[in-house]
Image (tube, rainbow, N blue to C red):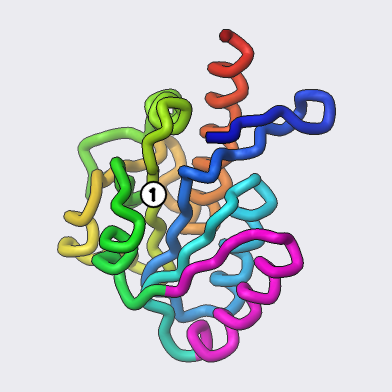
Amino acid sequence: MQISLQSGGDKVSLPSNLYVVIHNVYSITKLYEAARISYGMGVKTFIISKAVGSAAQEGVPDVQKLALKLNRNMLYLADLNDVIDVLKPDYVYVFVRKDRADQQFNPDEIAGYLIDGKKVVLVFGGAEPGLTRKEIEKGIPIYIDGADDVGSLGQISISLYEISKALKQKTSDN
């Protein structure tokens, strides 16, 4: 597992055992921006699950091109079952609205799992109103306190930033 401080300690490069999944996405722009945010925050592998319509036809190739330019990884899988089957993660966190989850997002907990070498998958819904009950049951449903209506791009940004901060704190404590 690789957790490194870059550019004078300002940025934590997220470890390769953290995966971001956007599931059930229709919009080319949302798909591309989700990948751009993820890669920009240091994610090594971005996963597209169940892209539909123009997102599948045009968005997936655009994200693949971005991944190649940035020397990052991109996986395109049919659904969340495939993501879980291929990666065999230790933890799957599904980001939802507060009224659909009992557990609050805890970046310190996730950072601890990453430092311990556990595979962690973060799943974000690509379309409104979000994920179905069956899809939510594939992992641990969590919400970001105070950020209920920010959409998936906001959730991705906030969660990756907070995980980066927690990793930086935990690695500087050691």
Considering every residue shown, the one lying at the far front of the view is 1
Q: Tell me the crowding category of disc 1: few under 14, some 14 to 19, or many 20 or more residues within 10 angstroms, Cα based.
A: many
- Image quadrant for the C terminus? top right
Q: Examine the rendered structure and indicate whether residue 40 appears above or below residue 8.
A: below
- Give the residue drawn at x 66%, y 66%: 67
The x and y percentages for residue 116 are 41, 26
Q: Examine the rendered structure and indicate whether residue 127 appears above or below residue 44.
A: below
Considering every residue shown, the one lying at the far right of the view is 8
- Give the residue drawn at x 53%, y 90%: 57
Considering every residue shown, the one lying at the far top of the view is 173
Could you tell whether 28 is left or right of 111 in the image?
A: right
Q: Where does label 1 land, which residue?
A: 121
Residue 99 visible in rendering? no
- Report the amino acid beneath label 1: Val
Which residues are the magenta region?
54-76
Quadrant of the rendered image containing residue 80: bottom left
The x and y percentages for residue 24 are 37, 73
Judge by depth and name the residue closer to the eye, 119 or 105. Answer: 119
Judge by depth and name the residue closer to the eye, 16 or 39. Answer: 16
Residue 166 located within the stretch drawn in magenta: no
Q: Examine the rendered structure and indicate whether residue 145 appears above or below residue 69.
A: above
Quadrant of the rendered image containing residue 103: top left
- Give the residue drawn at x 29%, y 42%: 90
Residue 63 located within the stretch drawn in magenta: yes
The x and y percentages for residue 47 are 47, 64
Judge by depth and name the residue closer to the eye, 140 or 72. Answer: 72
